[in-house]
């Protein structure tokens, strides 16, 4: 139980394009979903927290107009990196939680912007 | 700035060895300490959520202890097996709501168990 999928697992795109990443809770309803980013040799850094049907809460330093988060249902959240640039190349990973403290993670998406 | 530190950064052991690693976190405000295991190309897997000082949790050959007063948690693996090879992450949570609710992550301890 508590499986989270994330697609795509890997994406390479040209600078200036937009990339959408999907995060789905497959066997449970997630009240909250989290989006993290991890640069090489750094720890997981929370980008934003999203609750179904409401606007995401972004962490300091994360541009909400660049990283668009949509949490349309209790099982799906999407992160769109708009007008991606090489500095946005990173590992993006989502997690989902119910009323407990445990976060269930997807496998992550490796984004490379050329 | 809240800081979570894990040591050692990496560890190589032989199959059958027992091992342990440390997670250090701020002792001033404490709500919960999470341990995760992350195998390459897979999703991080939750191991423990620890909330009480002195707490000890066990899952098979893996156990963890918590000292909130001094700000550390130990993770122990008894009789390491090659399938235990992974990065072990800890994450600290300072409070229940608002900005304190988010998890602050360590860099992890990378464990390699040689057969």
Image (cartoon, helix red, strand yellow):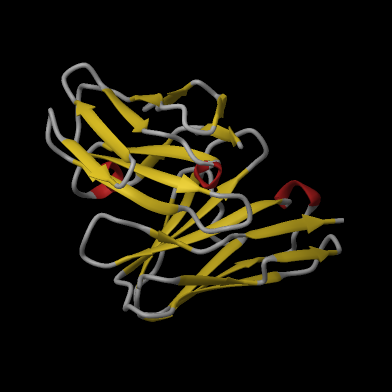
Q: Position of residue B57 (x, y in %)?
A: 21, 40
Tell me how many marks there are: 0
**As drawn, is A64 to the left or to the right of B76?**
right
Residue at the image point whose x is 74% and y is 63% from the top: A83
Q: Residue furthest top?
A: B70
Position above or below: B101 against B68: below
Q: Nearer the viewer, residue A46 or A9?
A: A9
Residue at the image point whose x is 53% and y is 39% from the top: B87
Position above or below: A75 against A46: below
Q: Residue furthest bottom?
A: A73
Q: Nearer the viewer, residue B22 or B26?
A: B22
- The quarter in which the C terminus of chain B is drawn is top right
- The quarter in which the N terminus of chain B is drawn is top left
Q: Position of residue A105 (x, y in %)?
A: 45, 60
Q: Nearer the viewer, residue A8 or B11?
A: B11
**As drawn, is B93 to the left or to the right of A60?**
left
Q: Position of residue A20 (x, y in %)?
A: 65, 72
Position above or below: B69 against A13: above
Q: Quadrant of residue B21?
A: top left
Position above or below: B112 against A1: above
Residue at the image point whose x is 64% and y is 33% from the top: A41
Q: Position of residue B84 (x, y in %)?
A: 49, 43
Residue at the image point whose x is 56% and y is 33% from the top: B110
Q: Quadrant of residue B86?
A: top right
């Amino acid at each position: 139980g508590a499986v989270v999928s994330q697609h795509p697992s890997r994406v390479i795109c040209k600078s200036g394009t937009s990339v959408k990443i999907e995060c789905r809770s497959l066997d449970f309803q997630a009240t909250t979903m989290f989006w993290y980013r991890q640069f090489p040799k750094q720890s997981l850094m929370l980008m934003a927290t999203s609750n179904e049907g409401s606007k995401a809460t972004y962490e300091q330093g994360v541009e909400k107009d660049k990283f668009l988060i949509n949490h349309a249902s209790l099982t799906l959240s999407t992160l769109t990196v708009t007008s991606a640039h090489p500095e946005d190349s990173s590992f993006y990973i989502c997690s989902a939680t119910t009323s407990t403290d445990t976060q269930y993670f997807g496998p992550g998406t490796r984004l490379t912007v050329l | 700035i809240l800081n979570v530190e894990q040591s050692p950064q990496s560890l190589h052991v032989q199959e059958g060895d027992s091992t342990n690693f440390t997670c250090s976190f701020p002792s001033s405000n404490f709500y919960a300490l999470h341990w995760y295991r992350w195998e390459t190309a897979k999703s991080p897997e939750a191991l423990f959520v620890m909330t009480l000082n002195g707490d000890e949790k066990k899952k098979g050959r893996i156990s963890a202890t918590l000292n909130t007063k001094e700000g550390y948690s130990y993770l122990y693996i008894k009789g390491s097996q090659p399938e235990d090879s992974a990065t072990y992450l800890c994450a600290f949570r300072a409070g229940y709501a608002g900005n304190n609710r988010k998890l602050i992550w360590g860099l992890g301890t990378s464990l390699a168990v040689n057969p």
